[in-house]
Amino acid sequence: MSNTMKRRVRVEIDLAALTRNYRRIVAHVKPAKVLCVLKANAYGLGVGAYARTLAEAGCKMFGVAEPFEALELKKCLRGSDADIQILSSALPDEIPAMVRAGVILPVTDVATAKLISVAAVRARKVARVHFKIDTGMGRLGILADDALDVMGEVLALPGLDCEGVFSHCPMAYDPKDPFTKRQIARFKKLVSDAAARGIVFRKVHMAASDAINNFPEAARPPFNVVRTGINLHGSFDPNGRRALKVEPVLSLKTRVAQVRKLPAGTTLGYGRTWCLNAPTRVATISAGYADGLPLALTNRGFVLIGGHRCRIIGRISMDYTTVDVSDVPDVKAGDEVVCFGRCGRESITPDDWAVVKGTHAYDIICSLGNRVQRIVRQ
């Protein structure tokens, strides 16, 4: 295959926009510090470029979901003094390697803390840990009612630096839901009660991207760290506020495969879900659900060609999608198609797709297929 041949589908990542977004978030939550979440290979976009760009912009804290992500991130940040933290859980067989690597670990129960302590003593290291408190997420961590007793027991173990405490919110995308406010109040009381017992933490965090936008009190004392993931990409949950003035980082592009004028009565795609009621110019574009186009866009979504919004007509298939190009003069095979991103004065975002699919931007970004080429732009 020629080295000059272009991949049909590509996602372009604007690293300058990423830097601007990070700095806007930093300014918005100041004096709290920002921990950038780069789990799942930076949501499938390539953790290396993201990590190096954010580190150059001043980020000193990164979060991941599991040990292999932590080790990959350490390679990307070799020579940096940035902290890498696992935010979810640590399994028994994973703990010794994570302690040796200097990864910050979550304490989700006393048993885990004891294993981290043993590994730290054996490695002649001090393991940094954060207590993970379940204030209502119902997924992982120490139940809030049990937390003070667990903290007391863990603090007596050797080899641990219990530097932090954190929690997570299941409803922070909805600014009107009272559950998050109750969670925040419960967590703040726990931190206060711990301080009354002489247990003080250097890092206290609860807010992720949704809470940063919808519950600003979660970025104020006693909180001094926030976590951000989706806002770095310029995306938001469709239900919440958009307090952060961030911009889209991503553009998903493909090319026209063929243009035909089809007669009235022609049906398009699997299931024959669209029937042309008049002669119509139809372009088949070289992207489908294997590349990340949600099936929910069938007969509902749009793409951009030549600065025009072109309606998706017919069911999206694995490799191709048909669109109405009646309003696009001179479109031909090989022309660029913007699936999401900006084209002329028009734009489509992952958030727009998320609304149609009834989901959120994380789902859209993480669904970009393996054959989609990742291209970084400085």
Image (tube, rainbow, N blue to C red):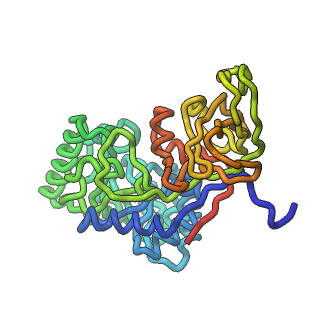
Q: Is residue 49 visible?
A: yes
Question: Which one is nearer the viewer's eye here, 111 or 230?
Answer: 230
User: In the displayed image of the protein, which residue is found farthest to the left?
Assistant: 196
- Please, which residue is most extreme toward the right here? 1
Q: Using the image, determine if residue 237 lies above or below residue 55.
A: above
State the quadrant of the C terminus.
bottom right
Left or right of 268 in this view: 98: left
Image position of 337 with respect to 137: above or below: below
- Name the residue nearer the viewer: 319 or 41: 319
Q: Which residue in the rendered view is the most extreme toward the bottom?
A: 79
Q: Position of residue 333 (x, y in %)?
A: 77, 49
To which quarter of the image does residue 246 belong? bottom left
Q: Residue at x 32, y 50 (%)?
A: 242
Position of residue 12 in the picture relative to residue 84 (left or right): right
Residue 1, horizontal then vertical, whole percent: 87, 60
Q: Which of the pair 229/96 is nearer the observer?
A: 229
Q: Residue at x 42, y 58 (%)?
A: 247
Q: Is residue 134 visible?
A: no
Position of residue 358 relative to residue 80, above or below, is: above
Q: Position of residue 376 (x, y in %)?
A: 60, 66
Task: Give me the residue at 66% from left, 33% from top.
Answer: 316
Specify the quadrant of the image occupied by residue 31: bottom left
Task: Give left or right: position of 212 versus 270.
Answer: left
Which residue is rendered at x = 80% and y = 66% of the image? Answer: 4
